[in-house]
Image (cartoon, helix red, strand yellow):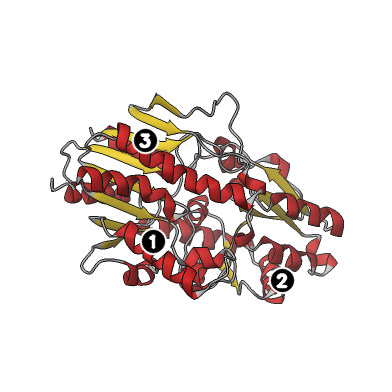
């Protein structure tokens, strides 16, 4: 059983409530266990690069939420349509967050960095951990330097040497490193100090309330295939659209493709559907979390596509666990670990991510699945969720890691 000694925990996260990430759930759990939790983050703006209604972009602001204290620094907006502003957004949090950590971070028992995107977001945690000589735990959700090259930055010997040095510098002061995908361990190993413990701690599923199917997806004779999440370039949605458009007309008439969410590539996808007049595709935009169970319940299958890049062969995205919880077949347009899980556990169908014709065949095969087999696939997904991604078990493990890092277990 995990120790329950109280700790003072400083969470450093580029994203936090009201942005919807697992760190919100984790922070609430630590408060419930009796820990004193503070969060260093920035003013919310994800994913549109715009402030939500009612928010003000102050240099520094403090607030209370769910029994913990949040300190926010100013964010850079407008990054959804500008690579330059996106890079400045990353650097801004690294700089402003580091200054705020030194000024207001105090001396926690442990610093916990939740790294969902660029590794620059861990810098405020690294700075405080070094300055105050306190333990640092990093939970890595995105693999650097691999993801930098996957997003299209040109790889040169000088850039590679500089980036590798930066990655090593970020991880050097860590007491423990956690990875959300098992394949990340081997990929990170060359950049980590010898003997640094690396633990595989996957994400758990969002809690899905029981809900009646959303009637807007009810179309007799049509199967509903849904993608829910960030609509970015690395989600491989252009190839999915190409494959869907290439379906024979009688098959396409029996299938609907739903995109739920927003992101940097959403406008381009909408434009393409309009220009090419691709029928049967619907964009729902951002949907409140409370409405998602009804959309999942009305879906016959859930789409999990990833681009054809080496890093994504190691990646199991967080939406995978939510798809398991929804109890629907998964169509994994991916290679590597995600493909292996879906095929090995009998969770749905797979297609090679770089092969439009292969994706088309998989979409067509989905329309031929027997309803009983679709239910069986969904049932096996929920069984896997209970076995390997149990929320309470993972929260207990994370609590124990912090106790051990702080020398309390």
Q: Which residue is mark 3?
A: 100
Which residue is at 33% across, 38% downward? 101
Q: Nearer the viewer, residue 203 or 222?
A: 203
Name the N-terminal-most of marks 1 and 2: 1
Residue 384 appears left or right of 217: left
CA gap, disc 3 and disc 2: 50 Å
Q: Which residue is mark 2?
A: 360
Does dot 1 land on a helix, a strand or a loop?
Answer: helix
Q: Position of residue 328 (x, y in %)?
A: 56, 56
CA gap, disc 1 and disc 3: 21 Å
CA gap, disc 1 and disc 2: 41 Å
Q: Position of residue 219 (x, y in %)?
A: 76, 48
Name the N-terminal-most of marks 3 and 2: 3
Is the residue under label 3 in contact with that under label 1 (CB below 8 Å)? no
- Asked where in the image residue 289 lies, by quadrant, the reply is top right
Q: Nearer the viewer, residue 187 or 127?
A: 127
Which residue is at 50% across, 38% downward? 19
Does dot 2 land on a helix, a strand or a loop?
Answer: helix
Residue 56 appears left or right of 244: left
- Asked where in the image residue 366 lies, by quadrant, the reply is bottom right
Q: Which residue is mark 1?
A: 166
Establish if 153 lies above or below 401.
Answer: below
Q: Residues within 10 Å of mark 2 (few under 14, many from 20)?
A: many
């Amino acid at each position: 059983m995990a120790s329950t000694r109280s700790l003072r925990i400083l969470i450093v996260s580029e994203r936090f409530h009201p942005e919807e990430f697992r760190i919100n759930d984790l922070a609430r759990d630590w408060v419930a266990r009796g820990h004193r939790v503070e969060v260093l983050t920035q003013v919310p703006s994800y994913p549109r690069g715009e402030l939500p209604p009612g928010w003000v972009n102050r240099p520094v602001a403090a607030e209370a939420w769910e029994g913990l204290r949040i300190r926010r620094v100013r964010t850079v907006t407008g990054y959804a349509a500008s690579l330059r502003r996106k890079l400045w957004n990353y650097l801004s949090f690294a700089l402003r967050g580091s200054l705020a950590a030194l000024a207001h971070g105090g001396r926690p028992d442990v610093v916990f960095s939740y790294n969902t995107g660029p590794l620059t977001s861990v810098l405020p945690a690294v700075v405080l951990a070094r300055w105050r000589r306190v333990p640092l735990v990093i939970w890595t959700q995105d693999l650097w330097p691999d993801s930098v090259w996957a997003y299209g930055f040109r790889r040169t010997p000088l850039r590679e040497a500089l980036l590798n040095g930066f990655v090593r510098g970020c991880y050097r002061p860590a007491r423990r490193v956690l990875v959300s995908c098992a394949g990340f361990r081997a990929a990170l190993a060359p950049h980590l100090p010898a003997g640094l413990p690396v633990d595989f701690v996957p994400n758990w599923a969002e809690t899905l309330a029981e809900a009646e199917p959303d009637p807007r997806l009810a179309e007799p004779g049509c199967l509903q295939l849904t993608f829910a999440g960030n609509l970015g370039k690395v989600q491989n949605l252009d190839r999915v659209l190409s494959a869907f458009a290439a379906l024979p007309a009688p098959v396409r008439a029996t299938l609907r493709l739903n995109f739920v969410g927003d992101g940097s590539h959403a406008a381009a996808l909408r434009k393409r559907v309009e220009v090419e007049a691709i029928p049967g595709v619907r964009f729902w935009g951002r949907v409140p979390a409370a409405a998602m169970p009804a959309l999942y319940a009305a879906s016959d299958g859930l789409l999990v596509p990833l681009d054809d890049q080496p890093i994504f062969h190691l990646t199991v995205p967080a939406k995978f666990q939510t798809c398991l919880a929804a109890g629907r077949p998964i169509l994994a347009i991916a290679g590597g670990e995600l493909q292996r899980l879906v095929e090995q556990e009998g969770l749905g169908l797979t297609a090679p991510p770089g092969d439009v014709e292969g994706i088309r065949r998989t979409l067509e095969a989905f329309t031929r699945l027997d309803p009983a087999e679709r239910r069986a696939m969904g049932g096996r997904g929920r069984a896997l969720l209970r076995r390997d991604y149990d929320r309470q078990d993972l929260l207990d493990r994370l609590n124990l890691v912090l106790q051990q890092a702080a020398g309390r277990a």
